[in-house]
Amino acid sequence: MNAWAWTALLLYLGWTAFAFGVRAAQQRHRTGDTGFRGISGRPGQPSWWAGVLFVAALLGGAAAPAAALAGLGPLPGTAGPALRWTGLAIALAGLAATAAAQTNMGTFLARGRGHR
């Protein structure tokens, strides 16, 4: 189980470093702006909630592998190898989709909205 937990945690940390480190630096170099606004706006407004929930989602993404590494067992019915391999395939597909979306979005924004 620890090998799967370490794999999940390392994939998540790698995705985070890519999506918010590498891509943010490239976006800033291209456009002068990373695009990240963090938790902004007045408390209770939609922009504030978006930032708060985004931070919660980022922390939640590491929660399951961290819990497994801390010794917490899997939920009933989730320990099978087929489900783990399926999860790994979906995670890798998500990483690829994130990279493609951010690459295309960066090009789109750098060229001016809608003028390709």
Image (spheres, helix red, strand yellow):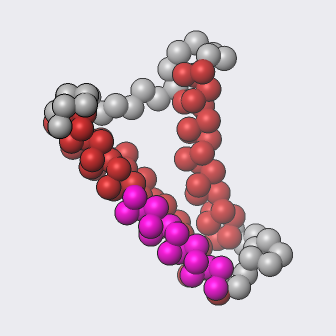
Q: From this viewpoint, is residue 103 visible? A: yes
| Nearest the eye: 66 or 34 | 34
In the image, farthest residue toward the bottom? 81
The picture places residue 107, in percent across and down from the top left corner, at: 21, 42
Residue 87: x, y in percent?
58, 73
Picture coordinates of residue 48, whole percent (x, y): 58, 22
The answer to whether residue 20 is above or below residue 31 is: below
Farthest residue toward the right?
76
| Residue 3 place in picture, x, y as percent | 56, 81
Please give the count of numbered marks on the rendered protein. 0
83 within the magenta span: yes
Residue drawn 65% across the image and 79% down it? 83
Q: Is residue 94 magenta?
A: yes
Q: Which quarter of the figure is the C terminus placed in?
A: top left
Of 108 and 29, nearer the camera is 108
**The N terminus lies in quadrant:** bottom right
Q: Is residue 84 above or below residue 54?
A: below
In this view, which residue lies farthest toward the front?
115
Residue name at image x 55 percent, y 47 percent? 58
Locate residue 70: give its quadrant: bottom right
The part of the chain drawn in magenta is 82-97
Which residue is at the front of the view, 107 or 22? 107
**Left of 15 or right of it: where is 110?**
left
Residue at the spot x=68%, y=70% of the render? Answer: 68
